[in-house]
Image (cartoon, coloured by chain):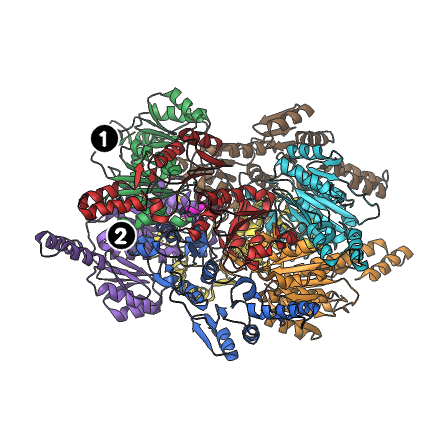
Chain colours: A red, B blue, C green, D purple, E brown, F yellow, G cyan, H orange
Amino acid sequence: MNSSDLLELLESVRSGTLAPDDAVARLRAIPFAVSRDAMVDHHRHLRTGMPEAIYGPGKSPEQVAEIVSELLNNGSGCVVLTRATPEQTKAALAVNAEAEVLGGTLVWRAPVVRDDGPRIFVIGAGTADVPVVDECIHTLRAHGIATQRIVDVGVAGLHRLLVHVEDLQSADAIVVVAGMEGALASVIGGLSGAPVVAVPTSVGYGSGLDGVTALLAMMSSCASGVTVVGIDNGFGAAMSVVRMFRTSQ
Amino acid sequence: MNSSDLLELLESVRSGTLAPDDAVARLRAIPFAVSRDAMVDHHRHLRTGMPEAIYGPGKSPEQVAEIVSELLNNGSGCVVLTRATPEQTKAALAVNAEAEVLGGTLVWRAPVVRDDGPRIFVIGAGTADVPVVDECIHTLRAHGIATQRIVDVGVAGLHRLLVHVEDLQSADAIVVVAGMEGALASVIGGLSGAPVVAVPTSVGYGSGLDGVTALLAMMSSCASGVTVVGIDNGFGAAMSVVRMFRTSQ
Amino acid sequence: MNSSDLLELLESVRSGTLAPDDAVARLRAIPFAVSRDAMVDHHRHLRTGMPEAIYGPGKSPEQVAEIVSELLNNGSGCVVLTRATPEQTKAALAVNAEAEVLGGTLVWRAPVVRDDGPRIFVIGAGTADVPVVDECIHTLRAHGIATQRIVDVGVAGLHRLLVHVEDLQSADAIVVVAGMEGALASVIGGLSGAPVVAVPTSVGYGSGLDGVTALLAMMSSCASGVTVVGIDNGFGAAMSVVRMFRTSQ
Amino acid sequence: MNSSDLLELLESVRSGTLAPDDAVARLRAIPFAVSRDAMVDHHRHLRTGMPEAIYGPGKSPEQVAEIVSELLNNGSGCVVLTRATPEQTKAALAVNAEAEVLGGTLVWRAPVVRDDGPRIFVIGAGTADVPVVDECIHTLRAHGIATQRIVDVGVAGLHRLLVHVEDLQSADAIVVVAGMEGALASVIGGLSGAPVVAVPTSVGYGSGLDGVTALLAMMSSCASGVTVVGIDNGFGAAMSVVRMFRTSQ
Amino acid sequence: MNSSDLLELLESVRSGTLAPDDAVARLRAIPFAVSRDAMVDHHRHLRTGMPEAIYGPGKSPEQVAEIVSELLNNGSGCVVLTRATPEQTKAALAVNAEAEVLGGTLVWRAPVVRDDGPRIFVIGAGTADVPVVDECIHTLRAHGIATQRIVDVGVAGLHRLLVHVEDLQSADAIVVVAGMEGALASVIGGLSGAPVVAVPTSVGYGSGLDGVTALLAMMSSCASGVTVVGIDNGFGAAMSVVRMFRTSQ
Amino acid sequence: MNSSDLLELLESVRSGTLAPDDAVARLRAIPFAVSRDAMVDHHRHLRTGMPEAIYGPGKSPEQVAEIVSELLNNGSGCVVLTRATPEQTKAALAVNAEAEVLGGTLVWRAPVVRDDGPRIFVIGAGTADVPVVDECIHTLRAHGIATQRIVDVGVAGLHRLLVHVEDLQSADAIVVVAGMEGALASVIGGLSGAPVVAVPTSVGYGSGLDGVTALLAMMSSCASGVTVVGIDNGFGAAMSVVRMFRTSQ
Amino acid sequence: MNSSDLLELLESVRSGTLAPDDAVARLRAIPFAVSRDAMVDHHRHLRTGMPEAIYGPGKSPEQVAEIVSELLNNGSGCVVLTRATPEQTKAALAVNAEAEVLGGTLVWRAPVVRDDGPRIFVIGAGTADVPVVDECIHTLRAHGIATQRIVDVGVAGLHRLLVHVEDLQSADAIVVVAGMEGALASVIGGLSGAPVVAVPTSVGYGSGLDGVTALLAMMSSCASGVTVVGIDNGFGAAMSVVRMFRTSQ
Amino acid sequence: MNSSDLLELLESVRSGTLAPDDAVARLRAIPFAVSRDAMVDHHRHLRTGMPEAIYGPGKSPEQVAEIVSELLNNGSGCVVLTRATPEQTKAALAVNAEAEVLGGTLVWRAPVVRDDGPRIFVIGAGTADVPVVDECIHTLRAHGIATQRIVDVGVAGLHRLLVHVEDLQSADAIVVVAGMEGALASVIGGLSGAPVVAVPTSVGYGSGLDGVTALLAMMSSCASGVTVVGIDNGFGAAMSVVRMFRTSQ
């Protein structure tokens, strides 16, 4: 149910073709379909302006398939499945094969990506951060937002980053993906006045503590106004950018 | 040195009244004035579109006064001093008494707050979160951004929050300040599609671990796209909002 | 040995058919049977009003089988085996196949589940919390307690939860199972005055720290009177409910 | 507004003396009074069956006084203030001196404590745990629940505990307050089938880690069904008992 | 080289058959044989009264075999290999098959176990603690010390422990092996005045934090004079008992 | 009540001058006297062979005085008060001034220290560890055990330690007190075969984490058989030595 | 591009054969070649005097091969690949088989190791630390620096270390590799005035916390001037030594 | 006792004027003077080439005075006292007033600082890091090493750092002092090939975790070969530089 569906329903009430009580019942009934292990949320787009995303980990392939099916069959718009295992991917495509598959991210009914949208950069400190960078990029694309991708510009080789300074200063938002000590977020936060969302990654070993070191470092950034999402959460960083640039609020 | 100063200088180069080498020397010389313990950054506004902020803790009153003086005497725009102790406040006002004093936040040459700016909400879970809420609000005001303030709407009394749902859904950005388990960020993130910046506070005791519990909980929020700043960092949350709505980069 | 067995023994003492010393010896001898690696406790039901539960992890299939056998062969009532691996399940069923098998929970001599018992809700925040939800439900059923099951009502989609508010307010006890930031426990604790037992789960990744984040958040809940059990401990939450509603204290 | 107030209002609607819209407006308006830094919740008793409690830490004496005044002047029942500092106590008593003052706990309009209520034990492991024991007892008393108090029965002197075994087995609920390694909760959980709520305290030093050791130990208790509240949270433990024995939901 | 070897050498010096310089050279040369990755210590028994123990983890089967060979071929007494993998066991037995193999512990030239030695108890809280209990028992046996073994007497079933009270009070030393919350160490420390060495185990899950919870709890024991060794370190606990009862100090 | 008191009582039973029921009642009554906040344990010496120790922290001066009085007035032997504040010391001496005062340790009715007892060394790594060293020494003296004291022999100046090697090898037990990285315990554990009890101290700063670093390091000692007590717990280390050398069990 | 290349380019500018703008363009273009997921840094040697090192973990074999190829084909000097998996090793050798393979370290165009260079010791506490010791040695060799290797000299057998004291006092730098409690770094730091770089390893179990215990202990070393690198980071320790003895600064 | 004293003694042995046994006795006797709570180490300079440093914290003013006196009266060279409180400073100057007092660092018999020594930079990220920067500089000066001081060049204002790049590339060693996220160490490590010693500081709040965040971040630096000392340990960083440039080993 999207905004125009809702207006139509309310108009029926106004015009007398639908009794208020019936309208209430229908509204109350619609928001989600209940399967055994999931309540599928059809109102989410209406409420937050964001398509429904299914987070793969911890769900069985059958559960994933059931949720995908429920969402696609009930008039929803774009549907995104993230961090899908090969088994989940297979089960989901068996429901509906018309998805774009980008690594572990699947997108059905992807919107058109606008050329004239905001200038968003997704920057990865090292080669090993690439999967998180790409999860972020694919999620943004599923929301119709184009990105520019820069990788392997860690602060130990600062000159690699400095050639991009003008780009960074003209950005509308920047996602910084970095593991180890996560210093890249502070450096970029100091170079640009754009919103900077930092994603700590579990890249690194030993004293990196599976991403906790980068998380703490980014939270303590000396560059003011840098914000942080969870470890390896490229999806979450993308969604924070979606919140900034959603078209209808 | 602001943008028009810079243009003037470059024009002098183009017109031949200033030799390029001299221009380089002047540009290189200007960015910061060096006192014994601080390098005062006059280019910051030019580079990031944000006024200079002086973070009080760890600086002696003399160091604070010296930096304030340096910034005010060199043509800078708005100057902000945060988390000032009474001694720092006194020393800073002795330099220039024309500051607005809002709790521990001092603002010189504050810009006019626009009535038609973005709709920003700053929401505090409990009464004890108020100082962090206010640090955020005062910092935003120093950047010309008006806010709406809601406090004491923690999730244990959800109905207090629910009367604000429409407001939250029409917001342009929301800062959520909460200690203890920090659940308010997740609830608001689910209710609104606006950008949500969460500030964990050290409010609470025992298992709150001085804010670490709230920090971890907010980073793990099940509401996608919520971002987080450091513990008690109302200033940082404000600056992340400034980044989103800065007018000129 | 149950209460009537004990009364019979004491009556024999009173009537003189059993010498006190012999009674002491028999009481001392009975409580547990000793196998090589386990002392099987036959007095537990008598002492605490709860059936014996065998916790699977860390025991070899042979050890599990030996304990199940000892308990079933000595007149005990209901016997519960939890978190059994397939190998342990097989070994236990070889001893006595008359068990209900519910996921990794096995129940022998399950009591009748009363229709008129307390109204207990077991609520899971997400689809990935389902195994812990079900461990809790199966354990309660093994103790004769019926439950109502609600899943996928995390706080990011609060409206899914709000349709259940009346149910929650009429509950006799509520078990809340949630990973990530565990905010659901606080929200439900604020909506209902019933006893709320929170189970943090290791669902989530990165900053969820394998359930430690949810554990800390639930311990710091702003909803007063919420209590917490260990990470993923659906069995423990069930037992805390059993303690509340045991028939003979 | 209590249940009979509500019924009266609804009856007015039914009888036509109050228009439905007006009823909605009144219901919506009533729940809380808004002061600058707190929303006072008048519906809480109606919703959860529990009186309003004001948690002292982090509030100024003025804020405390304002909230106490708001609650007492609006027909509410019992009002509880916990962990009050001497300054807060003084400010609150200036509003209304008719409070019982029990350590840092203040109670206005305390209900009559029933003689025939449930048998509740509050047990402290050591002499240094006494303040938390008493916070729990006073809070329960403010809710009309009598308790029995046992202190200094730590597991290092087990025989001191064992003389109470019969009492513990006949209890309706037991609160166990212990610092250091918190072993008392496990021992009591094994001796009694009653609900056991464990409160870790920050008593101890060094490896006690300000209560985190006891918290973790209690969460990992080998006695099944023991639940835990936050460090030093005698108030929370009391409220969990109130939830179990509340008379009207 | 044992004590009598040393006396013989010194006697040769005294009698003039060995020059002092040569004696020094021989003494300096003897202490250890150097292989590529290990320095084998032949003086250890002489210095500390304890046989050489080889800790398996992290060594390749070849390295283990080389060290075993070096020790056995140079006149050493008893040799112990602990935590051996099947591959290490195989490689070590290929060097010399005359070992007693007790789980992952191998002992060559084990001393006679004295019947009249100290009364040592090794007590395990649960069935899952058995491997650590047995590592301790086997290590003590390799040093000629007999033990009495009690398992599955966790504090949740205190009566199982209480039948052993007299034994515990007559003990010369007690090793307590427990995971989860480790409360057994405190209880036994309160019941007996004998030396109590506590071994935290990684048994348990979630909030047990792989043994850290038990470790912290045991370090914070309210029973005075309980000492602790590392997580799962049954070998270390055994060695601490060996230190107490070594025959020649 | 000591052993001879107990024998006398049992003899009265045997001879018929005391009815068994009366004997039971008296035995049950004697073990502890109950004051408001403490149960004073008169059986402790009988049960564990150790005098009663009162741990000061967290007790009010009045509580301390009451417990001291109770213990001294009921025929007990030696009484020890540890970590007493000046206020507690004053209150305790007001009850009975016949105490030896050694820093924060007070001893009443101290036993004669035997000249021919075991050779015990208490070794402190640095000058700042001295208070913990002395707490250990005073506690041992209160139990009739003499010690030898060596301080400022940290591993950074190894030669200072090496002059004591012969002493250490002839010791009957060694307590090692060290903060920072706690390496002294490992070095001494390698040099001597005697029992080694390690006490981590909170000496040091920053990365010493208030003693947690030393605690973890000592638990992980590569010298086998070293045992550890809690941070700064000189009293506990002393009690572990008392357990080793108690004369009557 | 090395120093002479750069001088040649600048000379062309001076002599007029290269326009300044063209020089700038060439300099700007040269520093790195861009592949999809990595920016290969050709200026690194010029900037820091150190050859390029490729860190294996987290990179696909294809990415590794691409980077190796890029570096070797562009005139670079020595190239080092560390922590290569067998798959990465295979892929890299397929690009250019002329590498020395030392465990997981591959070196192309290794420099001649100088006989008259500094005296560097790499010392491992135990046999299980050998892989980290060897990573360090191989990395130093790839930079033309010879080392002396000593292993299995942990502090529990101090005499094994003491035979090396003269060597250590004449060293130019010492790398100490140790797990468990890491005490070896402190002992060596006290014996020698040379630079000491400590590498904590994840060797050990339980309370070693995967190397965190050793890391904290080494950071807290009582031997002044000891520095520390990350857990298991033999490569990093080698690079810190390279920094000390690089020939052209 | 310095090197020439030692040679003289050995020459006496060679020439027969001193018996070897007497020489041994004298050598053994000399190394340290024993006061009650400290062993003063007169051999330290001989052994490590570094003067004796007295670490103030945890020592009483009397202990400090005693150690200073002992060192100055026994022919030692330079003596350094660090982190002295005003009371310790006063007590130490009462012993000998001829000290240079630099903040909390006192130096007696400071060596001449060489003009032609190595080029050492000590760099502080922020104004609040200045006390640690100065502790490092004063300690180096006490060892005759001059430094260059740069402060307030944190990575959020990268251009302030970049004007120093040539200096950093020509440095012989660099100490980087930074709190918060400690990113400055990585940036400088990437810009210069000189040895970089990083000092995490406890500057910052909340998520800085009193320096633990910076410590972990620096240990995980993506710039290879950066080494780290303990939190706020400016003295330790200085000593690591002293080790690199000590003239006589």
- Please identify the residue farthest to the front as the structure is shown: B15
Can residue F3 be seen here? The reply is: no
Please name whichever residue, B82 or H109, is drawn nearer the observer in this view of the structure: B82
Q: Is E141 above or below relative to C220?
A: above
Q: Is residue A147 left or right of residue H47?
A: left
Horizontal and vertical percent for residue E81?
A: 63, 32
Q: Which residue is mark 1?
A: C11
Subunit that carries the residue with mark 2: D
Q: Is residue D194 left or right of residue A127?
A: left
Horizontal and vertical percent for residue C106?
A: 36, 28
Subunit that carries the residue with mark 1: C
Horizontal and vertical percent for residue G127?
A: 68, 38
Q: Which mark, residue H3?
A: none
Q: Is residue E214 magenta?
A: no
Q: Which residues are magenta?
A: C206-215
Horizontal and vertical percent for residue D197?
A: 34, 47
Inspect the image, locate mark 1, and give the three-letter code of the amino acid beneath it: Glu
Q: Residue at x 84, y 48 (%)?
A: G116
Inspect the image, locate mark 2, and give the three-letter code of the amino acid beneath it: Thr
Q: CA distance from mark 2 to mark 1?
A: 35 Å
* Image quadrant in which you'd find residue A69: top left
- Please identify the residue farthest to the right as the structure is shown: H15
Q: Is residue A98 left or right of residue A166?
A: left
Mark 2 is surrounded, within 10 Å at the Cα level, by few (under 14), some (14 to 19) or many (20 or more) other residues, namely many
Mark 1 is surrounded, within 10 Å at the Cα level, by few (under 14), some (14 to 19) or many (20 or more) other residues, namely few
Q: Which residue is mark 2?
A: D147
Please name whichever residue, D64 or F249, is drawn nearer the observer in this view of the structure: D64
